[in-house]
Image (tube, helix red, strand yellow):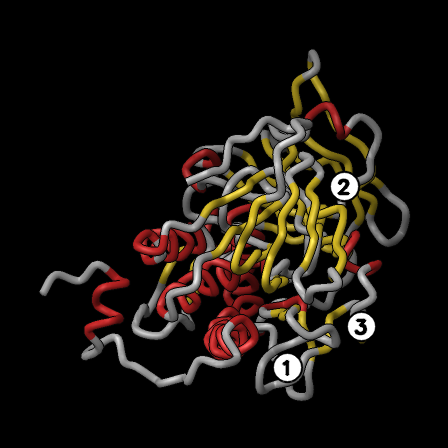
Amino acid sequence: MTQTTPSGSAAPAISAEVVIIGAGPCGLFQVFELGLLGISAHVIDSLAHPGGQCAELYPEKPIYDIPALPVCGAQELVDRLMEQIKPFKPTFHLGHEVVEFARLDNGRFHLRTSGDRTFDAGAVVIAAGVGSFQPRRIGIEGSEAHEGSAIHYRVKTAADFAGKRLVIFGGGDSALDWVLELLPRAASLDLVHRRREFRAAPASVAKMQAHVAAGRMRVFEALPHSLLLDGGQLRGVNVKLPGGALQALDADQLLVFFGLHPKLGPIAEWGLELEKRALKVDTEKFQTSLPGVFAVGDINTYPGKKKLILSGFHEAALAAFAIQHHLFPQKKQFLQYTTTSPVMHQRLGVPD
């Protein structure tokens, strides 16, 4: 459910056991792990929908390292997580950014969002991925007017590009993944990268080069220079080759994968210990330098950290137990299994 207090209203502070900042996969799984322990959560995210970077930037990109799912689309993963947390009825506050954060004298936390919703929380989990992010744009004259119609920084639905003349910019995994995914659907496809070396997985680069050798696509070492328009409609793009010459490429759609501008935003001002723009945590509780504030997923750092969804799920599980102890220090903790525990079955809504 979504809290519907109008933005700007003087509503009283929402009392919450836990506030989770970030509705990406790790934030959603944190809801589940807390729910198993009988702890409720409010989830805040600056995007208008759950899913974080997965849903926003590559909803159809396949993921291969989720246990028991040989392959799973990014949006499919988000949908499955949303289904999994239904029994715990989290409250979502979407389209809100946390702009105020303070620890209160009683050990609880005050938060206020850009929509003027305030929270009085017993604990806070920061699961904000890389923080707020914007795609690096193509940066050529007149491009802004065509963003979302002919110039794209994400792929929502691969079918939208069937039968189109495509030019893809970039040399990382996102660019190569979409080259391989869209090539069979496209009328034509050119790949443009600023240098000869690619940053993508070697297997993807090898597949792309095999398609180039077979004449199915072209690749150019070049930079974007200018749009080719006809009556205001995109008809192609000029790219600048290493020698300075311009090469005209026919195109109905441009896909640009130059990466992201990751910014911690207000989180950087909250007095939490940072290391290379990430929140330092311990590996027992995944607690930050401020007791009662935890961090899971890509936003945290610790020795041996790996930025994988799989790792974030593990972090959320351990953080949940630490949060339970923080909220209810007098309560004895017992590890119960969802397979056999009647309490877990009741919380999950499993029929007797």
- The residue nearer to you, when weighing 295 against 157, is 295
- How packed is label 1: few (under 14 Cα within 10 Å), some, or many (20 or more)? few
Residue 145 x/y as whole percent: 73, 23
- Residue ID for mark 2: 138
Q: Earlier in the sequence, mark 1 or mark 2?
A: 2
Task: Report, in whole angstroms, how far the alpha carbon at label 1 lies from the one at label 2.
Answer: 32 Å
- Residue ID for mark 3: 274
**Which residue occupies 54% across, 53% down?**
16
Number of numbered discs on residues: 3
Residue 117 x/y as whole percent: 64, 39
Residue 171, quarter of the rendered image: bottom right
Residue 99 x/y as whole percent: 75, 46
- How packed is label 3: few (under 14 Cα within 10 Å), some, or many (20 or more)? some
The quarter in which the C terminus is drawn is bottom left
- The residue nearer to you, when weighing 173 against 274, is 274
- How packed is label 2: few (under 14 Cα within 10 Å), some, or many (20 or more)? many
What type is the residue that disc 3 sits on? Leu
